[in-house]
Amino acid sequence: MHKNLGEFLQYLEKSGDLVRVAAPVSRDLEITEIADRVMKGPQSRNKALLFENVLGFDLPVAINLFGSNRRMAAALGVTDLEELNQRLAKLVDLRLPQGIGPMLERAGDFLGALRGIGLGPAMVRHGPCQDVIETEQPSLERLPVLQCWPGDGGRFITLMQVITRDPITNTRNVGMYRLQVLDRRRLIVHWQRHKGGAEHERRAREAGQEAVRIPAAVVLGGDPISMWCASAPLPPNIDEYLLAGWLRGKPVEFVKCVSQPLEVPAQAEIVIEGYVDPNEHAPEGPFGDHTGYYTPVEPFPVLHVTAITQRRRPVYPTTIVGIPPVEDVYLGQATERLFLPLLRMFLPEVLDYHMPPEGVFHNLVIVKMRKRYPGHARKVMFGLWGLGLLMLAKAIVVVDDWVDVRDMSQVAWQALGNVDWSRDVVVVEGPVDHLDHASYRHSFGGKIGVDATAKGPDEGYARGWPEVIRMSPDVRQRVDEMWEKLGL
């Protein structure tokens, strides 16, 4: 496991997965254009980038840290993202182990989880994130915050952990909410209405006290697992740093903030402390978003900066979003793999699922299931629409258990050929993503479910479902044996 961002950068460089850029570049648009070309280019040239000469700034800028399956897996301490699924599946397996060996293995899994989660925050008296402390004149102008796209309304912090606590229960929430720089001491926090930070804002206003302020900390860097966990769609009131501790095998170390009643990861590069006034909003945007479109101007709460702390020689981590594929595709794929076992706890008939990059996470979910009775595919659709942020899925396509959900050619063949559009489609209304520009009402619109499974008489299909064309196994084996002699 990588203790902090510096260790992760060293690992990437040793493995040939980091390019240091010494040429002078501007934080305004140029870094985005360079990074976007790298992200969309051949995998052989898709590297993490460290810009060492950002015009007007002393801090280097790191980008595309997680922008490949290889780097994303390395960040999370696995060799393949599928290991996340396997590890969590073992932990949440509710079946009783049979025999002493499986019992001891299960006990080891639980002890490892407890060791990672710990009894609470692992507090330390001092962390590198507070080597340099500025409380008198903290200024955001020292940070090389990017303007990503020409139509953006300003400069945005894009790769962060925003820490807040519920003003009533004191429960911590960690989210990855972009922040627009208003001036040297103010940011606008883009927490969407379905996210935990927005719930803290609502609860603060409902408290009926106009003076209620929400302490907040914006964490840049840290260990790469904690950086990723800010993007994980955990259930409400589940601390994202508990998930980070489980993946790390030991709890995340925290230090107390210097100006706010919060704790922050001790290994962070930079921490911006402040408070959010739930009664103060400012127009945020436009912003070139992960949908590939600019999101329009909308009011969001203002964060007032009270302190900035940092390492002695910090690195500024950032990312860009835009027309896929870009770096966030791989952050999403890690989430997809990790959360499959939890999804299967509620819907055990689901074998696998996939959110292709073109669907920008919420526009398309392809689901493979083991079908057992009439209407079973519809049960899965409505079950998914009732699970956490999968409620925002605009299209769910359900396929049979032999279909590879990552083979888009195979999925399209099944979805287009196995559907009677008058009978096998469900169209409903419900919550949709805050950023969905196609819905006629904000955050509420139409959703579609497509049953692309084979149908039988018990579903009113009386014709007899045809058999898929497949070559006989003995012929395939004979051709396999002669293949090298064919000169093909």
Image (cartoon, rainbow, N blue to C red):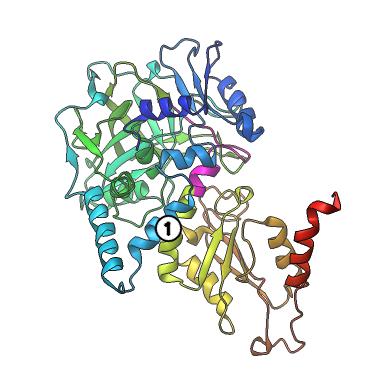
Could you tell whether 434 is left or right of 97 in the image? right
Q: Position of residue 172 (x, y in %)?
A: 26, 47
The residue that appears at 56% across and 66% down in the rendered structure is 429
Q: Nearer the viewer, residue 367 or 143?
A: 367
Q: Taking 424 as reference, is 154 above or below it? A: above
Residues in magenta, as a range? 317-333
The residue that appears at 33% across and 18% down in the rendered structure is 139
Q: Taking 57 as reference, is 148 above or below it? A: below
| Magenta segment includes 144 | no
Q: Taking 186 as reference, is 379 above or below it? A: below
Could you tell whether 234 is left or right of 70 in the image? left
Visible residue check, residue 171: no
For the view shown, which residue lies furthest in the left direction? 125
The N terminus - image quarter: top left
Q: Quadrant of residue 177?
A: top left
Residue position marked by numbered label 1 in the rendering:
86
| Magenta segment includes 329 | yes
Could you tell whether 251 is left or right of 412 in the image? left
Visible residue check, residue 258: yes
- Amino acid type, mark 1: Gln
Q: Nearer the viewer, residue 142 or 419?
A: 419
Q: Position of residue 447 (x, y in %)?
A: 59, 63
Q: Quadrant of residue 269?
A: top left
Q: Position of residue 378 (x, y in %)?
A: 57, 75
Q: Position of residue 83 (x, y in %)?
A: 44, 52
Q: Nearer the viewer, residue 133 or 154?
A: 133
Q: Secondary structure at mark 1?
A: helix
Crowding at dot 1, Cα within 10 Å, few <14 / some 14-19 / many 20+, comes out as some
